[in-house]
Image (cartoon, helix red, strand yellow):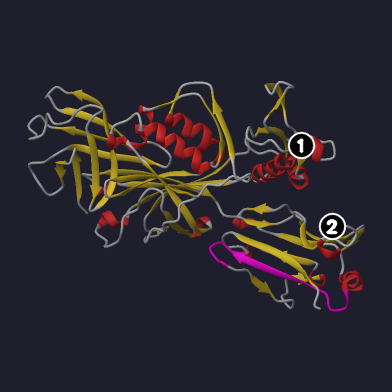
Amino acid sequence: MMYRVYCDDILLYHSKLENLVLLNPSVELEVNKTGSFTFTVPSDHPYYGLIRKLKSIITVYQDDYLLFRGRVLDEEIGWHNERKVSCEGELAFFLDSIQRPYDFTGGIREFLQMLLDIHNAQVDVDKRFTLGNVTVTDPNDFIVRSDIDYVTTWEVIQKKLLDLLGGYLQIRHVGDVHYLDYLKDFTLLAPQKIQFGKNLLDLKRIRKGADIATSVIPLGAKLKDAEGKDTDERLTIAAVNGGLDYVVDEDAKAQYGLIVKTVIFDDVTEAANLLTKGKAHLAGLVKLPETIDMTAADMATLGQDITSFHIGTKVRVESKPHGIDQLFTVSKLSIKLLDPAANKLTLGGVLDTFTASTSKITVSGGKDGRDGQDAVTLRIDSSRGTVFKNSDVSTVLNVVIFKGGKTITDAASMRAEFGSNAYLEWQWQRMGEATFGTILSTDSRISNEGFALSLAPNDVDTKVVFKCQLVIPE
């Protein structure tokens, strides 16, 4: 593996050229962070005086892959006149522009385009970006953002997009064009695996209960007064939720107790949309995620003919002692140019778990598609909640069918209501698979003619989704 460092297109370091030497060159990268590159220039380096603070553009290549691009931030002159240089990554260019007070309503892509247009108008050509792919979405298909202060573009991107909508920033370089992508998730799969006993160096499983909630009070945009000015009151869901301004997950409440939190959606102006967002937010809070932090060696730096790990790529991790076999995202990279064997990567993510839907699933509407006494819904209840560790899955999924005011929990009642040929069909889908597979009715895990499905630990190896549908043959 070969490394090259350029300063404004002038070769500053080459791992195979003895006259172009840098001391302790190190690249540190992290998802949604600016990243850094530090190195020391000996006093006898032929381009010792070439580097200009805040002006010079530094690029680092790993073979032909652009590993780092940024600008010189700080420098120190040592006893022997060596220059210790610190660089920050190109996302830091957004610190150089200011967003004036604004009031925006529209799509995510349009908002980000507005920010880039304003940024590009204030900075030099080599610090400008072109908007690329935007895959982050909002349930309302539009967002409302405003600010009365003068803040940096980087602060707006962090607070008005990343903090509220999540997602990942990615910069792509195509020729002289620097594209900024805003992605819901990364999709590139690394060709090498991380395996226990081979290149997995350290693993930590982190369980945090501080963020869990079993009830949420969703709050929307501020209400207007008669003159159209904002008041101190906010939209609630009471008007569309039976007079209640909160939602509760009863299963989570039974498991953890009642834990109430508020969440504010400044861009939501309709109570029905606020209710939808509140339920979705609560669904994420009731889960007690198990986060995995891992450190692993990059086999590409140890002489193997394989592509190196890159920030944001998906990597399959296999560790039988820890019960893990799934994809994780490379969230951090530490690269020592002079000691590739010391390169490390950190993978972060939530451990895949079993999930079963407990919300009502409409399988057919009323007559002529209308809701009413003929409307049919099917619900799946789990005897032990809906999220489990991979190594500790043991539960019974029970089906309840509702039709009008009737509750059906057995096959005889189902056939009496829907006909002698009516039956329940269970399906399952493992992470990464595009379609659901059917569980045969003769499967030993199925009982009560489909109204119950028993699951044991070996039924779930990664993330598995189970669903059940009512089939009424014509």
At 73% across and 66% down in the image, what residue appears? 468
Q: What stretch is highlighted in magenta?
A: 419-434
- Near-viewer residue (376 or 442): 376
Indicate whether residue 431 is drawn in magenta: yes
Q: How crowded is mark 1: few (under 14 residues within 10 Å), some or many (20 or more)?
A: many
Residue 87, quarter of picture: top left
Whether residue 406 is visible to the viewer of this picture, yes or no, is yes
For mark 2, give the secondary structure: loop
* Number of disc labels: 2
Q: Mark 1 points at which residue?
A: 237
Indicate whether residue 3 is drawn in magenta: no
Mark with earlier residue (1, 2): 1
Which of the image's four quarters has the N terminus?
bottom left
Please name the amino acid that badge 1 sits on. Answer: Ile
At 27% across and 48% down in the image, what residue appears? 66
Q: Position of residue 302 (x, y in %)?
A: 26, 56
- Near-viewer residue (242 or 102): 102
At 38% across and 32% down in the image, what residue appears? 119
Please name the amino acid that badge 2 sits on. Answer: Asp
Whether residue 35 is visible to the viewer of this picture, yes or no, is no
Residue 266, quarter of picture: top right
Q: Distance between the residues labelled 1 and 2?
A: 22 Å
Which of the image's four quarters has the C terminus?
bottom right
Residue 8 shown left or right of residue 141 in the figure: left
At 26% across and 63% down in the image, what residue appears? 305
Q: Residues within 10 Å of mark 2 (few under 14, many from 20)?
A: few
Q: Is there a contact, CB below 8 Å, between mark 1 and mark 2? A: no
For mark 1, give the secondary structure: loop
Say which mark, if any, is on residue 371.
Answer: 2
Residue 252 shown left or right of residue 20 in the figure: right
Q: Position of residue 41 (x, y in %)?
A: 15, 32
